[in-house]
Amino acid sequence: MKPNPRLLIVDDDPDVTAMLARSLTRRGFLIDTTGSPDEALQKAVGTAYDGAILDLVMPGRDGADLALLLRQQIPGLPVALLTGYVHSPLLTTVERSGVSVFLKPVAIQDLVDFLQAQLA
């Protein structure tokens, strides 16, 4: 894994975003955050993200759509989707697209392990 990989965190809950950013920064990741899927797409233009952590259910564009659009901009981008909805119909579609799903509240070490494996 390259030193200090850059991650994009997109979640409409600022407390979740702040917690993830703090925890992952302490583990050596460079973090960009936003609560808006549309802003995330703008940030991804010209930015070499190494991974993304997205909330599945957000107002407007959902995390599944955002994941697909980000992966069009950055092919092979490792994406972790966070959700509190175990039976969401989006989960089947998302998992088929190669995106990994984690249930909230997520264990930070599980995210770190996923990212390290994807970036190795």
Image: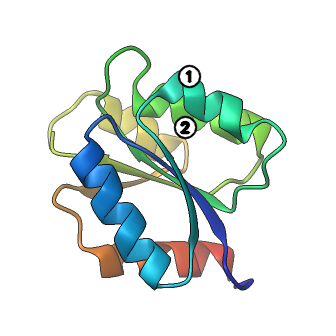
On the image, the x and y values in percent for residue 110 come to 33, 76
- Looking at the picture, tell me which residue is in the foreground, 6 or 93: 6
Q: What's the residue type where badge 2 is placed?
A: Ala
Q: In the shown orientation, is residue 84 left or right of residue 79?
A: left
Q: Residue at x 64, y 30 (%)?
A: 41
- Camera-nearest residue between 114 and 28: 28
Residue 38: assigned label: 1
Q: What crowding class fits label 1: few (fewer than 14 Cα within 10 Å), some (14-19), or many (20 or more)?
A: few
| Residue where numbered disc 2 is placed | 67
Residue type at the position of mark 1: Asp
Tell which residue pokes out farthest to the top in this image: 60
Which residue shows up at 23% across the image and 50% down it?
A: 15
Q: How many circles with numbers are drawn on the protein?
A: 2
Residue 87, given in percent of the width and then of the height, sits at 15, 37
Q: Residue at the spot x=39%, y=14% of the render?
A: 60
| In the depicted structure, whether residue 24 falls above or below residue 103 | below
Q: Is residue 54 left or right of residue 51?
A: left
Using the rendered view, name the quadrant where residue 117 is placed. bottom right
Instruction: Name the quadrant containing residue 105.
Output: bottom left
